[in-house]
Image: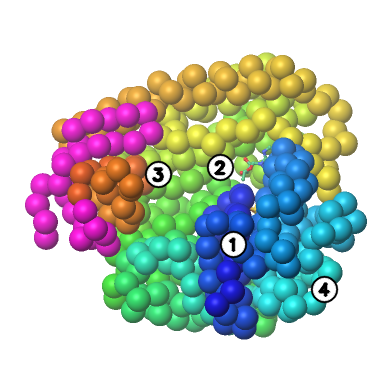
Amino acid sequence: MKKVFIETLGCAMNVRDTEHIIAELNKKNSYEPIDTLEDADLIIINTCSVREKPVAKLFSELGIFNKKKKDGAKIGVCGCTASHLGKDIIKRAPYVDFVVGARNVSKISQAVNTPKMVAIDINNDDTTFEFEEYRNSLYRCSINISLGCDKSCTYCIVPATRGQEISIPQEIIINEIKKAVQKGAKEAFLLGQNVNNYGTNFSDGREKTNFTNLLKEVSKIDGIERIRFTSPHPLHMDDEFIEEFAQNPKICKAIHVPLQSGSTKVLKNMKRGYTKEWFLNRCEKIRSLVPNVRISTDIIVGFPGESDEDFADTLDVIKKVKFEQIFNFKYSPRPHTAAIDMKDQISSEVSTKRLNDVIELHKIHQDETMNSFLDQTVDVFFEDLKPNGEIFGYTDNYASVFVKGSEELLGKVLPVKITKAYRTSLFGEILETK
Ligand code: 5AD
Ligand code: SF4
């Protein structure tokens, strides 16, 4: 068997794309994934382009990979940066053998066998393509429910790299999850750029449906114990969706509600479609219906025109919602976006200061919420064995838990008493083995 080394950057969609890439290569060319670049016959970087830094790093990394690779090994660039730079990648790094964009994963085998192939069509439709099976985790089945994004957030390059949004037909999603259950999966992780806009646009023109209906159908699958999803959009969080999230016992009580900014003015300039008040109202509703929910968010600081008052609104939302987890970013100007040409770009110093303010405020909330787990008993789904003899898993509401234990705990959901709380993880003891 030939060997493929894949480095995956970016989001959960990219992680799933890597699984599809491995599955396809395995079917057509018999490749198996390995961790050592030097032994690989094929090296792939599955790139992210959402911020500038990783894109800049790509070419230095390609240079290193080219020096380290064994004679005759091929190098390919996939993912979002492949979509947006296309053939320029081969111009700048002529030793790159192929470029396959984020919307063209089904073409990977053809690309490997076609010298200098560049496949970056963002209108390509993979929604009914039958990918082979390959999963990183035995217990979690990640599955795309839609491709692309129909929004036009003014900071975001994704619509230019992943194209217009199309939903994957429900029966394909359900069948894939059922297949994964037969192989031991207990958790379904539904993926899309905007999951709660699911069902508005199918390529076969079928009748519309919605995300709440899809959640109901997935939860009917025997053997699926936990359902997670990312990312929902605050704009589409209607009451029906929040109520289903609250009352369906299979849906994990962790939700990502990407804020971006707490200022209604900045949100308008970002074209997010909601106000500070709507965002707070949605989070209040979620917290009131689901007392143990953990809410995570994304925040961008230093968006063009963000004044001190605007940033104070962001801090105000953080104080009110007390997010359990924040992914915070300094605004990064991107090609193919409207914000790149906006006036009042914010200096790096101001953005850094604001980023630190977010981090410091969030630490207080992290400590509060993590300490509240102490002496509590929580159900943990164990999924990973660490080299130090610890077993790792998540609570239903997505807190990370470590216990001392061994392999036979993997794939089980067990009650754990929390004995230590750190800022980002918990440590505990298993109470009984079911
Ligand atoms: N600059 C900084 N952060 C960005 N994100 C998207 N585009 C940019 C950008 N140009 C962030 C958003 C998004 C997350 C995936 O990345 O917060 O939710
Ligand atoms: Fe994912 Fe966006 Fe990065 Fe593409 S640009 S890999 S969609 S985070």
For marks 2 and 3, give the one nearer the viewer: 2
Amino acid bearing label 3: Ile
Residue 50's x, y, as percent? Answer: 70, 45
Using the image, determine if residue 144 lies above or below residue 261.
Answer: below
Circles 4, 3 touching at the beta carbon (< 8 Å): no
- Part of the protein shown in magenta: 406-434
Mark 1 or mark 2, earlier in chain? 1
Circles 2, 3 touching at the beta carbon (< 8 Å): no
Residue 84's x, y, as percent? Answer: 80, 55
For marks 3 and 1, give the one nearer the viewer: 1
Magenta stretch containing residue 419, yes or no?
Answer: yes
**Quarter holding the N terminus?**
bottom right
**Quarter holding the C terminus?**
bottom left
Q: Which residue is mark 3?
A: 286
Amino acid bearing label 4: Pro
Quarter assignment of residue 6: bottom right
Circles 3, 1 touching at the beta carbon (< 8 Å): no
Q: Which residue is mark 1?
A: 39
For marks 4 and 2, give the one nearer the viewer: 4
Viewer-proximal residue, 79 or 258? 79
